Image (cartoon, rainbow, N blue to C red):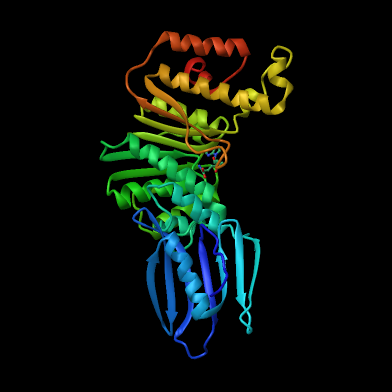
Amino acid sequence: MLDITIPENIIKAIISGKKNKNQDLEKVKIDRILIKDEEVLQVSSYKGKQVFHKNLNDQEINQEIINLLENDFNNASIYTKEFQYNYRITAKGKLLTNRQKNDDDSFVVLAHNKQKKYLIEEGMVVPALVDLGIMAKDGKVLKHGYDKFKQINRFLEIVDDAIKDEKELNIVDFGCGKSYLTFILYYYFVEIKKMNVNITGLDLKEDVIDNCNLIAKKYNYTNLKFYKGDIAKYSEENKVDMIVTLHACDTATDYALYHAINMDVKYIFSVPCCQHEINLQLDSSKFHLMNKYGIIKERFSALLTDSIRANILQYFGYKTQILEFVDFDASPKNLLIRATKVNKGGNLKVKEEVDNLIKEYQIHQTLYSLMFEEK
Ligand SMILES: C[S@@+](CC[C@H](N)C(=O)[O-])C[C@H]1O[C@@H](n2cnc3c(N)ncnc32)[C@H](O)[C@@H]1O
């Protein structure tokens, strides 16, 4: 009997080094996987060219590994999220063990993902996301793409939740960039839900727009079009039902909201970023405490900007909320303005509050100017 302690919370294990050269069993792999929301440890036994699978729970797996080391194999590498444990049985039957830090980040992805269910789960292949380099061909999210994958999935979930009763939608993604969000929206609503959805992506950068159009063409996404252009100069003849922005820089968000209000779109989902405009204007002598620390000034300016934007939307008849759409770790730019057109607006008290903020801080704010000063 081997005196061996198997670690808890195994994510993966490889058992190898045949005791008997003639035995059929070549090696055994163990992987923690999700089956119908249940975590199991899948044991894959390699015999010649065949692989046999069985699923065990956390208690059963310990005895399984011990049996394999006693009867069939001399080596085992067992991985938990934190450590890799190595076991070797010498020719004299002595058990040698060591432990090292597990630096393989792909395990973190698995552990993370199993805590949260997304509309597009890891493992579901979204072809365009493979082309865009955040997903492998088998649907595994690559480490560098995980934060973006989380952001676009949460964004998708929030949109999906709001449009449950819609069958047809024209959507514009302002500042679409590489268009991870645009493609996941299209894939989910058109390819999976079979909705009649048209999406237009707009961005300043010619190379990213060309690439996005190539990908859309490759997958025959006929209702998805990308255009190069400045949001400020955007105009559209056709009806637009929804606009989305994800990290459209600084005042680009204001122009997007301006068009949304003017086009009377029903839904707005906007995650602003780089709110420099007010940051550069705050009067240091008047608001010394706010300006004393750069990070406070930056965050305060961003919050001031977004509260002005949200109130302007409310004034124009939108029911408006600001929510944290992902946690701060996934992106510090994590506030989403969600607005749905509910009435004609015109609440003077709301406008007065915005006027007061603008006067108090003596600032120019692009959306405010576009809506109230440049008419
Ligand atoms: C930080 S990226 C975000 C891209 C994408 N939405 C995402 O989340 O991956 C911001 C994008 O906005 C685009 N952008 C900024 N100002 C713009 C403007 N005035 N008109 C069009 N696109 C603009 C930039 O070219 C850039 O691709």
Q: How many numbered markers are drawn?
A: 0
Residue 238 appears in the rendering: no
Asked if 176 appears above or below 47 in the picture, the reply is above
Residue 247, x across and y down, in percent:
53, 38
Residue beneath the point at 33% across and 17% down: 344
Residue 65, x across and y down, in percent:
49, 70
Residue 350 appears in the rendering: yes
Relative to the observer, which residue lies in front, 363 or 318?
318
Quarter location, residue 173:
top left
Asked if 134 appears above or below 198 in the picture, the reply is below
Asked if 329 appears above or below 30 in the picture, the reply is above
Residue 333, x across and y down, in percent:
56, 35
Asked if residue 294 lies left or right of residue 132, the reply is right
Q: Residue furthest front?
A: 1
Quarter location, residue 277:
top right
Residue 67, x across and y down, in percent:
48, 74
Residue beneath the point at 56% across and 65% down: 5
Relative to the observer, which residue lies in front, 121 or 369?
121
Relative to the observer, which residue lies in front, 49 or 323?
49
Asked if residue 348 lies left or right of residue 161, the reply is right
Residue beneath the point at 53% across and 47% down: 147
Which quadrant contains ligand 1? top right
Residue beneath the point at 47% across and 36% down: 325
